[in-house]
Image: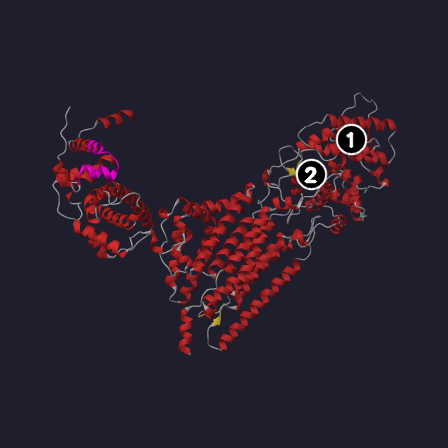
Amino acid sequence: MDLKQLIELYRGPLVGLIASWGAPWGDATEIAQDSFAEAYMNRESCRGDWEQPEVFGAWLRGIARNRHRNWVRSRKRRRNHVVTVEPAVLEGIAAPSGPELPLQLERLRTAIFRLPTKQRQVVLMHYLEETSIKEVATLLSIKPKTVEGRLYQARRALRRMLDNKISTTQIGRMLLCL
Amino acid sequence: MSLELVPESDLHAALRTYRVEKDEFEAGIRARIEAGVVPLQDQSQGVDDPLLTVAATFIPCPLISAGKISGSGAKLSSLTLSQKLLGYAALPAISLFLLVGATFFSARKIHNVQKENQSDLSDAEEMQAAVRQWWRSHRLGAAFVFAAVLILPMIGATWLLFLFLLASFGLLLYFLSSFARIGVGNRYLVGQSCLMGLVFLAQAMSNPFVGRSEIHFVDQKLIAVAFYIGTLILMPFVILSMARLGGREAFKSKEKSPHWLVILGTFLIPIVLFYLTLSSFRKPTDNQPAIFGGYGWWFFAIMIGVAVSAVIGAFVRRSRKAVVAHPVALPQWIPGVLYACITIPLMLWFTNQIWWPATPVRILQHVESFEKGRFPSITFRDWEIPASWTIEQGLDPDLSRARRVLDNEIATDQKMLTFTLGSAFRVGLVRPAQIETLPDLEQKRQSLLPEQRFLPPQPISSLNQYAWVFYALVQSDQLSPEDRDFLEQRLLATLENPVSQTADMLEDALVITQLLEVIDRPIDRDKYRKQVHHWLREFHSKQTHSFQIAGGFEKYKGISASMLATSQAIELMQIYGIPENLDLNWVRSYLRPLSFRHSSEKWIAAVTLDRLNHLPGMTQPTWFEWLHYERSLVAAMLLVVLCLYATLSSPMPKEEAKNTEVSDTEN
């Protein structure tokens, strides 16, 4: 597979994966682009045939993980700085971010980010760009069945959240607190 | 129970807004690949040497490039584990040497630049910002390093500290010299870093608690002196490099040169302080030695000379400025001279045991210049030890002064005589004619030799107060052979049945042994040797109670070592021999010459050390032992040599481009 095909294959799940680690969507996209570029430029260092989707997926995930760590550290450092911001930049930030979603979808989106990490990961990777279960599994180095299981659990959890129902896990935690 | 799942279509719809634009995403990746540079990529520094990558990570770039290169260097996360470990190993030296200097000098540079309104301000600010950022990022590590520098010498781990510093400084040197090779950094940078690091270490090593819990043969203040010497040698190099860095501009200022009154005040303050400190020590008082041995006036005269020349220099410069209207040389050397004015007396103070050692002549002088102190019993007791040593050595001291003091005591203050007569008799101050005039002699005789003599003989309580009675009775020939036998039995009973097993055992054992000699009934040394050796081992202390020097003998068990008890212990060893399993290097360490000792301990320590060195069977420390126990001092000297090497081996700074341009224009 060439670079174009690999980008097509892993673009969505990689951005979703990075977003699930806590990066804002804009930064997640930047990190994903950097990761693709670095993976391609250093493809000679890849153990195995990088043109194989399975090999490239695992290689890409490792690079993305390191880049995300760098990003987290640089964000901490940036927080330590007192910065001055131009008014034009502030206006740009304050501009509307896009069409408003119906209330139900807005609630669903909020609920997705309240899911447990593993469930959130697969949801974001799979549903962001309708990526196949296989690619998600390849990128996470787990079995497709596991991905399916997590997706099922996530959708059930989301339904409970939207219906304001308390899950059995939550009941168990509350009992433990008692 | 079945539960309806959230429809997949809803999930797609909820996340649709986050989808990235395909072409734009791919274009971004291709742009990165074509540029060959990935943002946040660690290869942006263009450094091939992995060690330099480490250096670039741990040392702020603007600092080593004097603000010419901005940025924060490579990312820590990109380093391998071994590279990180290497960086952390260099961290102590970076924080102690490089960053302390940088913090000080960058702030100073900004101040100068602001004063002169020059365009280099951004460089200086960049430097200071980088330094601040470094402190912020590594504050925990730096705090740990500074705490270690202050605490480790106090807990007896000076050597460990210097080991780390040496290794760390070696790495830093490698980093700096590598940077210098690629044209970043110069002698000024390295020199100022080393200078400030050494000043800090000298300050830390001036701590009075340094090296008190380890064996040493020399005063550990010499470590601080070694660092101070290093700073004094480095100072001219830094000033000269600074001159070269900015050409003549570095020594010129558009500001007015300081008024001569300012300079006079600047010099006058340390001189006055020094004089006030010196005044209390410049001559012996209360039977205490002079700290500077009478040479203090020389230092004072030198400092006055320096101050006068500084004032004359300043005056001449101002006069020249009035005639020729061009910038006047900035007196850059003034801080240097001021530093030397403060440091040199301090170094002389720390090394006064070298310039003013306790030689036999001086000990004799001390013995002969006896003065009655505030507490005669203590004064006589402390004086007795060096006095008896001078007699043993055949120096034939003139005791007339001490005799006059004793005569005066006998005539005026008989209440305290009980405590002083023992010492006076031991060194032969009391004349036979005076014995009749001594108070309570008959009463004490009856107490020692009662009419009705019970068997077994009772021990003598407060033996120290009765010691002089033995001498008086023997010298006035009032003891019959039966009396002597009875007193012998009482003394041996006192030795065998001590009142307390935890205090004064060494003193009692020594006094009893001496008194038995006096009444002509010498003790059976072989019989009591084992017991005395047991006490010697028991009362020997390797602890630093109350931050005292370890290695002496205790008067009270478990409290702290005492000079008097140590002296008595050595006298016991002269009689009973050296006990087994007692490391006398500890005792030698306790008695080593120090820059300052309380009261007349300097003389007691000196004579006791001499007695220790002349004990039968005593061996002198070998060179290996010297090196082993003085490894901290050797390491400190090595560190200073490394600093000098680093400074001298680094390239001289290139002259500023603007100077060249100016000269070209002029041509």
Look at the picture and state if B450 lies above or below B367. above
The boundaries of the magenta stretch are: A131-149
Kind of residue indicated by mark 2: Thr
Magenta span contains residue A144:
yes
Residue at 41% x, 67% y is: B116
Look at the picture and state if A103 lies above or below B637. above
Residue at 68% x, 40% y is: B563
Q: Is residue B45 visible?
A: yes
In the image, residue A79 lies at what x, y percent? Answer: 32, 48
Q: On the rendered structure, is B503 left or right of A109?
A: right
Q: Quadrant of residue B492?
A: top right
Q: Quadrant of residue B427?
A: top right
Question: What residue is shown with label 1?
Answer: B525
Q: Which mark is residue B226?
A: none
Magenta span contains residue B655:
no
Q: Which quarter of the figure is the C terminus of chain B placed in?
A: bottom left
Residue at 17% x, 51% y is: B23
In the image, residue B585 lies at what x, y percent? Answer: 66, 40
Spatial CA span between label 1 and label 2: 20 Å
Instruction: Tell me the SS state at disc 2.
Output: helix
User: Badge 1 sits on which subunit?
Assistant: B
User: B455 or B350, which is in the foreground?
Assistant: B350
Q: Is residue A94 visible?
A: no
Q: On the rendered structure, is B221 left or right of B119?
A: right
Question: What residue is shown with label 2?
Answer: B566
Kind of residue indicated by mark 1: Arg
